[in-house]
Amino acid sequence: MFENYRFNTNVIRFFVYLVLIILLAVTIIPIWILIVNATRSTTEIQQGLSILPSTHLFENYRILLGKGLNLPRGFSNSLFLAVSSTIVTVYFSMLTAYGIVAYEFKGKKLFSNFIVLLVMIPMQLSIIGFYQYMSKLGLTDNYAALIFPLIANAGAVFFGKQYLESMIMQDLIDAARIDGASELGIFHLVMMPLAIPGAATMGIFAFVASWNNFFNAFILISSIEKYTLPMLVQTLRGDVYRTEFGAIYLGLAATIVPIIIIYAIFSRYIVSGIAIGALKE
């Protein structure tokens, strides 16, 4: 019987690893092809796929410069927006989630359900009203229109609430109050250090979402010197006579490098944050 159990376990493990390898290949192959095409010329790309890099990387970069695109400036714009958005999202979302979890107040359940409702409403449905609101405030063509609304990020608040519900300890909060800590002091000095895995996970998702944000930025930002990397890549569509696919792939590759670096450095926080947040006492 033990031999049968061991055999069945090995078979299941084999198929699990096989599925994981297939999923890994499906994820990595498109990224690798994107990077390879960034080193190929337009003619080579039109001839078909290749998994080996070519020698036209610097030529594609010169084409980008010839089109008047300032990639370093676009990179700095995207980095500023991503970092600022991440800080605003994580801090205020965790603060709001802490208030919902740690305190009892009238309408708490209704407020929590309202947050869930906001999570299910796509941003595209409200973009016209949002643009009009930003226009009346004089925030069009301003990064503030992309940063300050994230103070009320419903998705991040929902994630923070689910995470804090699994790890918050009321006795620890009461002990801090007895020691004379203020309510904000308890949040900053007690809760945030304990919630680092969840906050880091939220920050990674917020950074990637802001870095890849094209839709809102394209509607609200009009000055080309304020364009982010995704917006600059959008201008590489080419003219009537020729589209430089190699340069386009190089621009796209430049946009994913920071995301790969962020995931490589902080991926362990994603696993630990989600795992802890999924546990309920």
Image (spheres, rainbow, N blue to C red):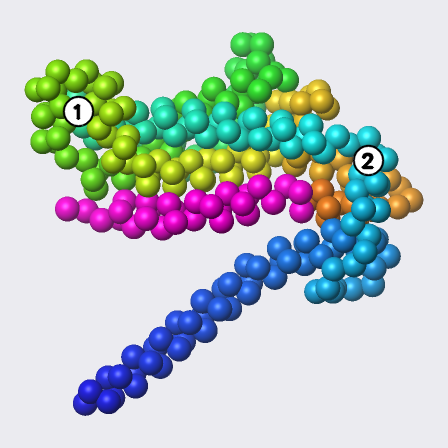
Amino acid type, label 2: Leu
Amino acid type, label 1: Tyr
Q: Does the rendering let one see residue 125?
A: no
Q: At 19% across and 35% down in the image, what residue appears?
A: 168
Quarter occupied by the N terminus: bottom left
In which image quadrant can residue 269 be found? top left
**Nearer to the camera, 51 or 209:** 51
Q: Which residue is mark 2?
A: 65
Is residue 129 positioned above or below 120 on the image? above
**Nearer to the camera, 93 or 155:** 93
Q: Which residues are magenta?
A: 253-281
Residue 41, x across and y down, in percent: 83, 54
Q: At 57% across and 59% down in the image, what residue appears?
A: 28
**Nearer to the camera, 57 or 108:** 57
- Left or right of 190 in this view: 229: right
Q: In this view, which residue lies farthest toward the top?
A: 137
Is residue 14 positioned above or below 92 on the image? below
Question: SS for tag 1?
Answer: loop
Q: At 78% across and 50% down in the image, what residue appears?
A: 57
Q: Main secondary structure of the magenta part?
A: helix
Question: SS for tag 2?
Answer: helix
Q: Which residue is mark 1?
A: 103
> Marks 1 and 2, Cα distance to the nearest angstrom?
55 Å
- Left or right of 24 in this view: 14: left
Residue 75, x across and y down, in percent: 65, 32
Q: At 84% across and 41% down in the image, what residue appears?
A: 63
